[in-house]
Amino acid sequence: MRRNVIVNQASLKTLITQVMREFEDKPYIKTGVSNRHLHLSAPDLERLFGAGYTLTPVKELQPGQYACKETVRVAGKKGKIENVRILGPLRKATQLELSLTDTFTLGIDAPVNESGCLDGAATVTLERAGVGASIERACAIVALRHVHLCPSTAERLGIKDKQFVSLVYGSGARELVFRHVLVRVSPDFEDEIHLDTDEANAGGIKNGDLGLIEP
């Protein structure tokens, strides 16, 4: 028999407040799953797209950082990957961020580096499909998983810039723990965990899912 349950609004509000406070007291951070993408330098943008070309932002990712309409083809020793998204703004050095699965597809050996570090980066060819423009660069890395935090959140959690932490997802038999996760703190950041597609797929993690930080 179906019963109608009447919920007192005041009680419901109290319950919601309690749940929100529980989450506030624990270091839960939302997750952003990062697909393969490319950061270009100004000279390389010009080589691929022509002098005076301006990227076309389509989606904000972090404050001042955005996904662009423009894509490239990436070619390695064994294969190619189409439609790799360019992210803005432009950087001093071109950097391609891949998953390990992507490196197998391309046939390259890319190091796991912090974003911005190109030590030992694998060489790939970046092509503007249908135009014929291409450049060869030692720029491919697998980005070290990391957490972006604003200073107020980092202070509340007692976590410092460049510190390594663990991330916990789920519980019980389905619990998954990522260790050696780099924390990056800046007033330019919004709080967000960045995992690549391999890492997210391993735990069935989606954009917006919450990870628990353990120092």
Image (tube, rainbow, N blue to C red):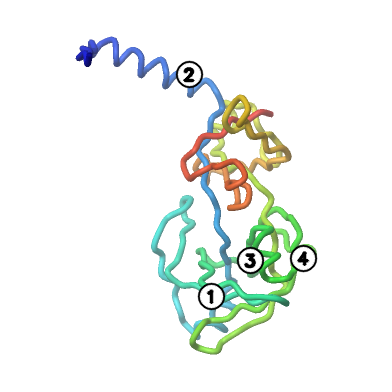
Q: Earlier in the sequence, mark 1 or mark 2?
A: 2
Quarter holding residue 78: bottom right
SS class of the residue under badge 3?
strand
Q: Earlier in the sequence, mark 2 or mark 3?
A: 2
Q: Earlier in the sequence, mark 2 or mark 4?
A: 2
Q: Earlier in the sequence, mark 3 or mark 4?
A: 3
Q: Are marks 4 and 1 in contact (CB under 8 Å)?
A: no
Mark carried by residue 33:
none
Circle 2 crowding by C-alpha within 10 Å: few under 14, some 14–19, many from 20: few
Q: Amino acid at mark 3?
A: Leu
Q: Amino acid at mark 1?
A: Val
Q: Residue at x 46, y 59 (%)?
A: 66
Q: Earlier in the sequence, mark 3 or mark 1?
A: 1
Expressed as whole percent of the image width and height from the top left, the position of residue 26 reads 55, 23
Q: Amino acid at mark 2?
A: Glu
Which quadrant: the C terminus? top right
Q: Are marks 3 and 1 in contact (CB under 8 Å)?
A: no
Does residue 81 lie above or below 173 as drawn? Answer: below
Compute the Cα span from label 3 to label 4. Answer: 13 Å
Q: Residue furthest right?
A: 120
Q: Are marks 2 and 3 in contact (CB under 8 Å)?
A: no
SS class of the residue under badge 2?
helix
Report the residue marked by disc 3: 96
User: In front here: 213 or 52?
Assistant: 213
Q: Residue at x 49, y 42 (%)?
A: 190
Report the residue marked by disc 1: 72
Expressed as whole percent of the image width and height from the top left, the position of residue 177 reads 67, 34
Left or right for 165, reference 206: right
Report the residue marked by disc 4: 109
Mark carried by residue 22:
2
